[in-house]
Image (cartoon, grey):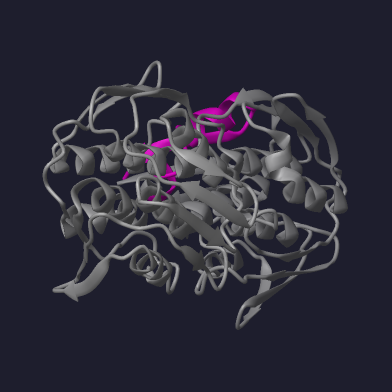
Amino acid sequence: MDKFVIAGGRKLSGSLTVEGSKNAALPIIAGAILIAEGETVIENVPPLMDIFTIIQLIEHLGGKISYDRDTKAMTIDCSGIHDNTAPYDLVRKMRASFLVMGPLLSRLGEARVSLPGGCSLGARPVDYHIKGFRALGAELSEDAGFIIAKGKPLKGATVIFDRPSHTGTENLMFAAVMAEGETRIVNAACDPEVVDVASFLNAAGAKISGAGTSTIHITGVKSLQPVNYRVSGDRLVAGTYMCGAAITGGKAEIEGINPSHLTMVSRKLYEMGCALQEQPNGVIVKGPKRLGPVKVVTYPFPGFPTDLQACIMALACVSSGTSSIKETVFEDRFSHTMELRRLGADVTVTSDEAIINGVDKLKGTSVMASDIRAGAGLVLACLAAKGESEVLRVYHIDRGYYRLEEKLSALGADIKRETQ
């Protein structure tokens, strides 16, 4: 099992380019199930553990996938898809595997998908997915830990979500894209990754409008065609490196992303004293000598992303005042606070809110990653800590960050990977 060994106190400096978005690539790969003939090519696919999990799942269902880690291009042929069952052994590894239900239901008329696993972040129900499928005319049941959906042809309908659901919106788009008539998703997720998925489907011949707004319209088509598509840059990875420059008082240019996807993150870094300059394909961040306090409320896009909550908390731990972070997206997403306290942070959690009193300096020690983003936040805290730190269970981090230690080393960090 690998760990990161970090000697803190070095400023990050330089430039780097982020890979494609994991949270866009995963649903796009799942969406390729809808293309019944020919080869689809997806470019800028990051070589991450979660990507290899979805590859295994598609191959289990009967698809063929080839992937070049060097060019980050993936060729998908789903003409042989025949199995409608996504087993627990694969789905338990990550929750995004549940995204094959919409394409399987649309393509085969029946899907049998295990209830999802993945990071422990409290309740992340699939109720919105089920509600949407039922609205399109599918019959759903649960048996031995599997959700079973049956229905063909599906028929367009209006679906209203109680609150925006990223994966719920994507799964419903998959189910509706070849349904008869028109479908309307109200209170849809507005995330850039949802826009990416809709753009991919439209390139393949779908008729989707309104992606990126709270109301998405879908007119069903009879079939989709093979397509070449490039995944957008990973805003969450970019935001992590932006926070890295900020917490170390360094200066870094992050390329490969649309800066408008990080407007709220940039705003909060500016409030903490950072200087920011947007570029056509990225952003430059310069951290201050001492960060100021901040008030953050996580919220679906365009709000502050919950996936960068641990990173902004790391910054608050070494700020000059008292900060507050309210988590409104996921339950139990403060697991990293216990580890931050091991580094000397002053963090108090009450229900869904954390109060952070900034300290002059964190002190190096051993900490443990509990999920992808918590692990990234701990790495940032260790970069700012005095002395040497260890971050254990970095396999969590590897699910969302490609060669994190190499990227940070290239920016001047003293970080290395060791096998325990």
Residue under the point 57% across and 69% down: 163
Q: Is residue 142 left or right of residue 249?
A: left
Spot occupied by residue 371 in the image (x, y as percentages of width and height) = 44, 57
Left or right relative to 390: residue 269: right
Q: Nearer the viewer, residue 307 or 156?
A: 156
Residue 413 in which image quadrant: top right
Which residue is rendered at x = 62% and y = 78% of the image? 352
> Is 74 displayed left or right of 46 in the figure?
left
Tell which of 28 and 370 is nearer to you.
28
As drawn, 328 above or below 258: below
Which picture quadrant has residue 148? Answer: bottom left
**Relative height, residue 245 to residue 270 (above, below):** above
Looking at the image, the residue that sits furthest to the bottom is 350
Q: Is residue 126 one of those drawn in magenta?
A: no
Q: Position of residue 15 (x, y in %)?
A: 67, 23
Bounds of the magenta segment: 396-420
- Residue 181: tell me if it is visible: yes
| Residue 204, horizontal then vertical, whole percent | 41, 29
Quadrant containing the C terminus is: top left
Identify the image quadrant of residue 201: top left
Percent x, y of residue 252:
73, 30
